[in-house]
């Protein structure tokens, strides 16, 4: 059973460049979440998907950020025109949500650490 | 809006001792989940323990137990017989009980860095 994977694990970019991160959830999980964690803080919710539908976006997700989950499997998070304030760990999580109503926990990936210079 | 507060930024204890991490939260919801997550250095976040607000009995998982005080909105984590592998950042977290609904994002506290000393 493979867990949630994220790629790349580390990314260093110059201010103004675009970056894209990928998250592969656990295969049967239909919900996928993105969080951002800055140094010394807890993760903050960014957005989440149910299959391919993006159901909620945080106010933290400015118009420079876009997330997709085109086939309801993997997801990408793109940041355009990066700023130094975007430097953070970007965490992906997934879980299964079904008609039984039984909750399952969110499983987290290892994260992508972004450094904007 | 829900908030989660962890008042202890950092703690250190000797191996084999018992340690308690504090957490308070604020919500107007009556039904919700509370969690403690562990994030070891350079490793991914894992769930330590979960408490459902409608359950009065405190959750336990091996050496980990919670003291859930719903009226006081307090949710502390006790680690018994602490081990070197318990060294990590610990996050207290909240999630609404939305059934099959949409609002199931997790709200995290700022964390407590726990050092277990040999």
Image: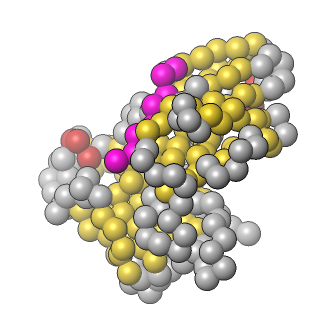
Using the rendered image of the protein, determine whether residue B105 is visible from the camera's viewpoint.
Answer: yes
Q: How many numbered dots are placed on residues in this image?
A: 0
- The residue at 41%/82% (across/down) is A52
**Which residue is at the front of the view, B64 or B14?**
B64
For the C terminus of chain A, the image quarter is top left
Residue B4 belongs to the span the image colors magenta: yes
Residue B54 belongs to the span the image colors magenta: no
* Above/below status of A29 relative to B73: below
- Determine the main secondary structure of the stretch shown in magenta: loop
**Which residue is at the front of the view, A94 or B28?**
B28
Q: Position of residue B12 (x, y in %)?
A: 64, 15
- The residue at 53%/74% (across/down) is B100
User: Residue extending furthest bottom?
Assistant: A71
* Above/below status of B65 relative to B35: above
As drawn, is B6 to the left or to the right of B82?
Answer: left
As drawn, is B39 to the left or to the right of A42?
Answer: right
Q: Position of residue A101 (x, y in %)?
A: 62, 75
- Quarter residue A20 falls in: bottom left
**Which residue is at the front of the view, B43 or B21?**
B21
Colour scheme of the rendered structure: secondary structure
Q: Position of residue A2 (x, y in %)?
A: 68, 67
Q: Position of residue A58 (x, y in %)?
A: 29, 58
For the N terminus of chain A, the image quarter is bottom right
- The residue at 61%/82% (across/down) is A99
**Which residue is at the front of the view, B83 or A59?**
A59
- The residue at 75%/35% (across/down) is B65
* Above/below status of A75 relative to B30: below
Give the extent of the magenta segment.
Answer: B1-8
Using the rendered image of the protein, determine whether residue A89 is visible from the camera's viewpoint.
Answer: no
């Amino acid at each position: 059973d493979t867990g949630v994977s994220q790629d790349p694990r580390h990314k260093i970019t110059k201010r103004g460049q675009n970056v894209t991160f990928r998250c592969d959830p656990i295969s049967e999980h239909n919900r996928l979440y993105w969080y951002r964690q800055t140094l010394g803080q807890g993760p903050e919710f960014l957005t989440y998907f149910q299959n391919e539908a993006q159901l909620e976006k945080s106010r933290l997700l400015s118009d420079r950020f876009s997330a997709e989950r085109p086939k309801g499997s993997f997801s990408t998070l793109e940041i355009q025109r990066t700023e130094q304030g975007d430097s953070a760990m970007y965490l992906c999580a997934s879980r299964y949500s079904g008609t039984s109503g039984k909750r399952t926990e969110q499983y987290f990936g290892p994260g992508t650490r972004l450094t904007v210079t | 809006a829900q908030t989660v507060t962890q008042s202890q930024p950092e703690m250190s204890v000797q191996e084999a001792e018992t340690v308690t991490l504090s957490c308070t939260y604020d919500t107007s919801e009556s039904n919700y989940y509370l969690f403690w997550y562990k994030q070891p250095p350079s490793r991914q976040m894992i769930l330590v323990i979960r408490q459902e607000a409608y359950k009065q009995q405190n959750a336990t998982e091996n050496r980990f137990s919670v003291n859930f005080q719903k009226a006081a909105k307090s949710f502390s984590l006790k680690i018994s017989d602490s081990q070197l592998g318990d060294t990590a950042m610990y996050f207290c977290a909240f999630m609404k009980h939305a059934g099959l609904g949409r609002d199931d994002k997790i709200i995290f506290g700022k964390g407590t860095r726990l050092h277990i000393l040999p």
